Amino acid sequence: MCINITPSNDYTGGNLELEYNNQVITLNRNPGSYIIFPSFFRHQVSKVQTGIRESIVVWVQSSLDEVNKLKDMFTKN
């Protein structure tokens, strides 16, 4: 999970980008907005050009069986 902290007009760049179904999605930058996604999804934060970007990142671990179920669910064509 990633939670945005900094107001989006306080920095440029720093977009959280997530790849889903072969498309790159740029996520909401409003303070307090959040996204929960499996960590095996391709994701990145673009370079912050000006200002400071702050966020909270939370990792939750589950059993390998649960992770494999998620992978199967999200990677089927």
Image (cartoon, grey):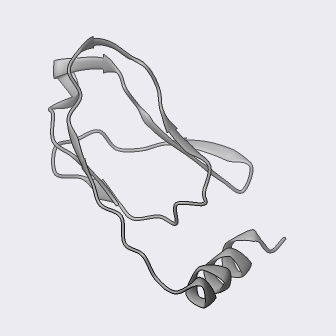
* Residue lying farthest to the right in this orientation: 77
Q: Position of residue 43 (x, y in %)?
A: 55, 45
Q: In the rendered picture of this protein, how many numbered marks are placed on residues? A: 0
Q: Is residue 42 above or below residue 13?
A: below
- Residue 51 coordinates in the image, percent (x, y): 20, 14
Name the residue rendered at 59%, 83% in the picture: 64
Q: Is residue 34 above or below residue 76?
A: above
Residue at 15% of width from left, 34% of height from top? 6
Q: Is residue 65 left or right of residue 48?
A: right
Quadrant where the C terminus sits is bottom right
Q: Position of residue 67 (x, y in %)?
A: 59, 79
Residue 75 placement, left or right of 64: right
Identify the residue at horizontal 23%, vertical 18% (top origin).
Answer: 11
In which quadrant is the N terminus drawn? bottom left
Where is 28 relative to 53, above or below? below
Where, by quadrant of the figure, is residue 29 drawn? top left
In percent of width and height, residue 9 lies at 19, 22
What residue is drawn where x is 46% and y is 82%? Answer: 62
Q: Quadrant of residue 59?
A: bottom left
Q: Please, is residue 68 above or below residue 51 in the view?
A: below
Q: Residue furthest top?
A: 50
